[in-house]
Structures are given as structure tokens and as C-alpha cells.
Image (cartoon, rainbow, N blue to C red):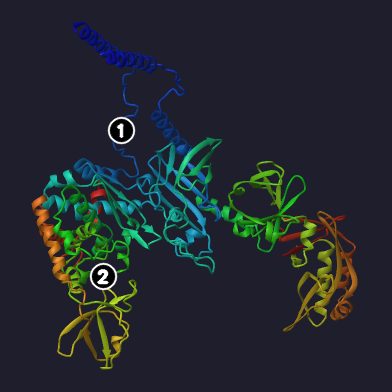
Amino acid sequence: MIMKKIQYYISALLLVAVAAMSLSSCSEDKLGPTIFPDVDETLDPSSYTYQLDKFLKQNYLDKYNLTFLYKMPDISTNMNYNLVPATYENSIDLAVLCKYLWFDVYDKVAGEDFLKLYGPRIILLVGSPAYNPTSGTEIVGLAEGGIKVSLFKVNELSRFINNPYMMNEYYFKTMHHEFAHILHQTKTYPNEFNTISIGHYDSNNWQDRSVGQVASLGFVTTYASSEFREDFAETIANYIVLNDDEWNYILDLASRGWTSGDEDDVTSEFFCYYYYPNNDVTKDPVYIYDFEVYTVTDEDGTVHKYWRYNTDPATGERIIVYDVEDKDGIDGVEAILQKVQIAREWLKTAWNVDLDELRQEVQRRQFTEDGRVAYDINDLRKQVTEIQ
Amino acid sequence: MKKFLNISLLSLVALSTLSLSSCKNEIDEIFDEDAVARLDKAKNEYIDILTSNGGKWQMEYYANGDEPGYVYLMTFRKDGSVTISGKNEWIGYVEGESLKVPTYGSLTSLWDVITDNGPVLSLNSYNKYFHVFASPEDIPSMSEEDIDETGYGHEGDYEFDLMKYSNDTLYITGKKYGIDMIMTRVDAGVDDEVYMNEVVAMADSFFNAKIPQVYINLPNGIRWIVKDGATSILKMFREGDDEISTSETHNVIITHDGLSFMNPLTIDGYTIQSFIRQADGSLLCRDDNETTITAGDLSDVILIPSFIWKCDTTQFGGVFKEQVQSLRTELNNYSKRKLSSIQVTFNSNLNVYTVDFACVSGKNTFHPTFYMTAEAVNDNQVKFSYTGEGDAASAIYADRCPSMLSIMETISRTTFTLSAGSLLAPVDMKLTDSSNASNYMLWRL
């Protein structure tokens, strides 16, 4: 028995010794110094882009550890799309506008450490849209893994540099949207949100729905009606960037009944009222288009706001308006406000961020009280052009 | 325990084997430096190549295999900026001009050499005159068929793998779509706009819409017919073969000094790609130094039945000049008539070439017309023979203005040697008396 034990220990010792030899026999292959060359991060004052690079270093890299990629390497994008880089001039403008209308807002409302901890690490500018030719849609923004936000259509910025509505649509709403994704991917939002509009999402045909139709169902945009995570991000983003008129417009649409010219055709245009000129009943649908407001006074003196339609208001014909019955069984206004409230409470409890304060600060930076653009792009550009 | 010992021994053998083989170092060092260091070195070398000697390059750019190539001049600077100049219809489109108008444009944007699998030239900020080919926007229709290309655009590259540098030529490959292209160094003192105007003028001199077809003349005597040259998308087929069933199309680029096919092309055993413009206007293949592109023998060209040649009497010399002057005097004496033009064309009904002397009298124009036959003597010599006949008016005019007959008779007894400013677009043909060079005429298409 003792002998067996000795044999056992000898065998075990031999095994350990050989194993040790086999491990140590390659000790000559010690890791040497890194094969990667030292990257000199010193900015070259003679560089054509020195001023912008210095601005980005001071205001994004040093502050948030964020790389602001404006020289688009195509490997940073999905190679299945045909994309082009942003212009240098628009890159400057978007860099200063992002700081003023987005980063500075969160710094002020949520504290300077908030974006350092949770903000994106890469912002990539893309000059063109990212079209999906098969579906007829386009990507206006992407957030990948809570790290990188890609902004598209940057080359169109110069067309509406003083138009916060369009800039929100293309960039800042996108950034709030993508950041909302980053936040809820870090701390999940209450499941209660997902139950509000359950059964009314349509991930395949959302782009064929109309703004009015989805508002009546409780969504702030058509994209919000694609799935609940997008609904959550869209609700937050739109609540922040839309001014009172725009937000109330969404709620107004949500309060109505909607019907379709052809209920079997999901792509047919939706309308919410029938019009009867000179009391002659017509069943021809009168289509409406967004954002061109026309006011009609009903027989009982009620003032209705409508949108441009294919009957010429200049004819002076008396128009009697009848509501379409709201058959969807959903209180669209209530659903939207309920979603905002969940987002509001979640941001406060999970992140200590006041959604209304955030909205107020964004609005203050976008518009003056009398509705003019609140920022001067030339002043903002000086942050770059006057860098020495 | 015995079982354990057996396992231990087996393990010992296995570990020993492993330990023996694990340090066997049989891989030879192929490179002196590691991959990253070599890539970084290559990147810096290409930056130096691109920016040295003034940094000006001609890029022969192809967006895809279905469109012509376009020349761009690029001036690369160490500060990361590049000025891109071009003159083509797409720059015109960007500037709101008609798509058919080649327009000059020059704009500064950004560039870099980045490292991927190898060094890559990246034109990494948007330059509307160049990136128009990479934009995913719909391409405006140039024909009745309008296809929606939204999402695709021209599918041109703006990043290029730097493959090789040799003799001031950079060989590059579009990174995404893989089209091979070249960049050649241009003298730094060149004015971009002048240079681009010369490229467009070169294109105009090559393929003239009045010349319906030209020929690729292979060293073995076989010819390939080339049509639609003015579009830079050449329709080609072997002479004698059926055009409809055998023709193929190839896109080309017209550069500052010649013409190149997008890819090397092998026809009848000869591989051709790049052609240099010669002093006589023809194109000579750079690859074999033998193959040419011409409009064919001048004696064939001048006798093409569909052509209408207008005689430029201000460019007549010797006896032809004297006879035309006499004719003008005779016409003036004939109720103050004036010679408006002399035109030569083929009348297929009569199977003769006709010489039409257009004479103006007041508001009326008369066309006394004389008939002649023609034959090619050799590649560049031709002889006409007056038949002694003409239309009804010719007899009257021959009587009142005998110089008309004199001209016809002089033409008839002369063997003409033909020459043209361009053998590829011989739209101006000089007919010189083979026995007396002072006698000549200039005919224009």
C-alpha cells in the first residue's frame, strides 16, 4: 500500500515536472515590445484641418473621450450601402451645432459626468443618405452597441443651417433617439411601456402608414409604430426637440378619427374628414397633406384647422365639415402622454435626468420666445475659425 | 492504480512530444520588419510620392464598366488638402447645366493615405465635382428610359488601393468596386483649366460625329470597325463579321495625350489598351507600337457615298485658284451672278459623283451640276473623270461661264494626293495635284 502511494506520488511529480518543462521550454518567445508604431497625437498646426481638429480634440476627445469622425473611412460604414463623405465645411458646422444643441444641453441638465459615462464614443458623419432601395426607406441615424452614432445626410446641412426643424429631423432628433437607445440598453425601461400599444406595431409596413393614422393609434411618428424599442426612443426624442406647436400638432392628430380611401390598401392616403361643398354630399375622399394649415369654421362656429386639400379654398364655397368616427378604439392622446410619463419617470429614477428640463433647454437654444432661431451659426463657427 | 500509471506514462510521452515540438522554429523570417511597421512605411512612402514634385497627378477615373472614363487633375498637398479639377458633363450637372455640356470645375477637399490591408488613397471629404460618381442619388436620365438608381448612383469609388508605383505612374484599384485605374504625374506648373480644355479638345479631335466609323488596324492587316466613338463607349466588330450578332462595347477614356480602354482588350491575338495621338491625328497603340486607329484609307473616305464635301475656294491654290477667280468674273458678267459654293456628292440614282456650282442671282440660286466618275488609285490617291455630262443647267452655264468646264477638265486630268489634318477625323481633306504641288483644293465635310 505504501509502495503504491510512493508510485503514485512519483508519477504525479513526474507529470508536474514535465508539464512545467513543456510550459517553460518556450520562455525564449517572450512578448517583445508592441509591433504597433507610436501614434503621434500632436496636432500639426500646418494641417489644412488643424482648427477643426483642435476644436474636436478640446471639446470632444479630451472632454468625453469621443472621436468625432468627419473624414469618412468607408470601413467605418456598412459596405452594403453606397455612401459619400461629408463636406469639410458642413463638418465644421455640425461639430459646433452638436456641441451647442446636444452636448452642452446634457452637461447643463444632467451634469458634466453624465455624457462622460454614458455618451457615445464615436460620432461618424456621412454626407449622403443611406438608402434601402428595396423598401424605399432611408436610414437617418444609427447607434451601434451604445458606442457609435452615425449621422447621415450631412451634405444637406448647408441648405437648412438656420432651420432647427429640419436639423432636428436629420440630426438632433436622431442623436436624442440614438442616445435613448444607448441609455435603455444600459438600464432597461419599464416593461409597462411595451404594453401600451401592443398589437399595433407593424415592423414591415410602418413606412406606408400616415402620420395622422399612427398618432391616433398612440405613436408620435410612423417609425415609432415599427416596434416598441423604436417607439420608446422616438417618444423621448420627439418630446425633446419638438416645440409646443409641433408637439400639440401631434396630439391634435392623435385626437381624431382617421379613415382610408381604400381600407384594403395599406398604402392609400389617410384622411380624417369628408368635405361637403354647398351641402352637396360628396363621397370623394379629400386628401390632406401635412403642415399646410387651412382654417375652416364649422356651421356652429367651431374653428377647425385642416391641411391643404384638393378643393380650392379660394372659390369661397361654404364648407361643412363632418368628423370621421374614431373607430380604432384607442385614445391616441392618452397613449402618447402615458408613454411620455413613463419615459419621464424612468429618466428621473434611473438617470436623475429631468426630461422637461432637458426639453426646455433644447427649446431655449433653438428658438427665441418670438419664434426666431436662437443661435447665430457665424458666432458658433468662430469657435473653430478663431482657434490659433 | 495500474491504470493510473498507464495513463501517467501516456501523458508523459504526449507532453514530452509536445514540449519537443513546441519550440521547433522552422518558419524563416521573410521580412525584416513586422507587418504594421511595413504598412506604416508604405503609407509614408506613398504620401511622399503623391506630394513630391508639386503633387499634381492625372487620374484616369472610371466609375463603372458602363460609362466612359473621365480625367481628373489632383494636386496633393502635405497639409492634407487636395485640389480636384475636371471638365465633364457631370460637373455640368452638379452646377445645374445641361447634362450634355462638359463643364470645368475645380474644388479643394481632403485626402489621406490610410492603412487597411495595404495603403489606401482616401479622398475622405466630399468634393462635389468628384464624389458625384460615388453618390447614391438617382442618376438623371440621358435617354428616354429612366431607371431609378436611388441607393446605387454611379457606384464609383473614392478610396483606392495603392497597388504599385513605377515611372511616375501609380497603379490603383477602386477599393469597393475593384476597377483598375492609373494616375500619372503631371508637371506642377500646368494650369488645370488649360489642361482640361486640352483634354476635351483632344476628345473632339478623335471622334467626329460626321465620320460614321473608324478602324482599329491590327498588325496582321485585319481591321475592326469602331462606331459611336463620340460617346466614348465604342461599339466594335471585326470587319466582314455581322454587326448585330458580333459587336461588343468597350468604354474608353480620352486623356491629355491619347485614348485608353478601361481594360486590356485582346482581339485577333493582339492585346491592346492604351493609344497615343500621333502628329497625323491617328492613334498608335502604346502596347505593341503597331496597331493604329484611323478613319481608314483617305481614298476610301473621300469616296464614301453619303458624304457631302463643300469646297473651300478660299483654300484653293495654283490653277484651281485661277480658274475659280475666272469663274467669279464670268458669273459677274452673267447678270451679276455670284458663286455661292461648290459641292461634291454622290448621286446613287445616276451612279456618278456630282459637282454642284451654286450660283446666286438676286433671290434665286441656280445649281448647274456636272457629273464625274471616281476611282481610288491607291490608299491616298484618287482620280476623277468628267463624263462630259451634267444636268440641264450645266449646258447653259458651260456656255456662259467656260471656267466651269475648265475646272471640270482640270479635275479630270489630275491625279490627287490626299492629306488630312487628322487621320482619325479627316473632315478637312486637301487634294493636291500629284505632279504639281502648287495646284490644290480643300474640301470640308
Reading the image, the residue beneath label 2 is A211
* Identity of the residue drawn at 55% across and 55% down: B66
Under circle 1, the secondary element is loop
Instruction: Output the chain of dot 2.
Output: A
Residues A365 and B153: in front is B153
In the figure, B114 relative to A335: above or below? above
User: Callout 1: few (<14), some (14-19), or many (20+) C-alpha neighbours within 10 Å?
Assistant: few
Q: Tell me which corner region of the image, top left, top right, bottom left or bottom right, holds residue B9.
A: top left
User: Amino acid type of disc 1?
Assistant: Asp
Reading the image, the residue beneath label 1 is A40
* Residue A157 percent coordinates (x, y): 31, 59
For residue B13, side relative to residue A366 (left or right): right
Q: CA distance from mark 2 to mark 1?
A: 51 Å
For residue A79, side relative to residue A223 (left or right): right
Instruction: Output the chain of dot 1.
Output: A
Marks 2/1 same chain: yes
User: Callout 2: few (<14), some (14-19), or many (20+) C-alpha neighbours within 10 Å?
Assistant: many
In the figure, A178 relative to B171: above or below? below
In the rendered image, which quarter contains the C terminus of chain B?
A: bottom right
Could you say which disc has been placed on residue B77 in the image? none
* Residue A261 percent coordinates (x, y): 32, 79
* Residue B244 percent coordinates (x, y): 68, 61
- Nearer the N terminus, badge 2 or badge 1? 1
In the rendered image, which quarter contains the N terminus of chain B?
A: top left
In the figure, B96 relative to B399: above or below? above
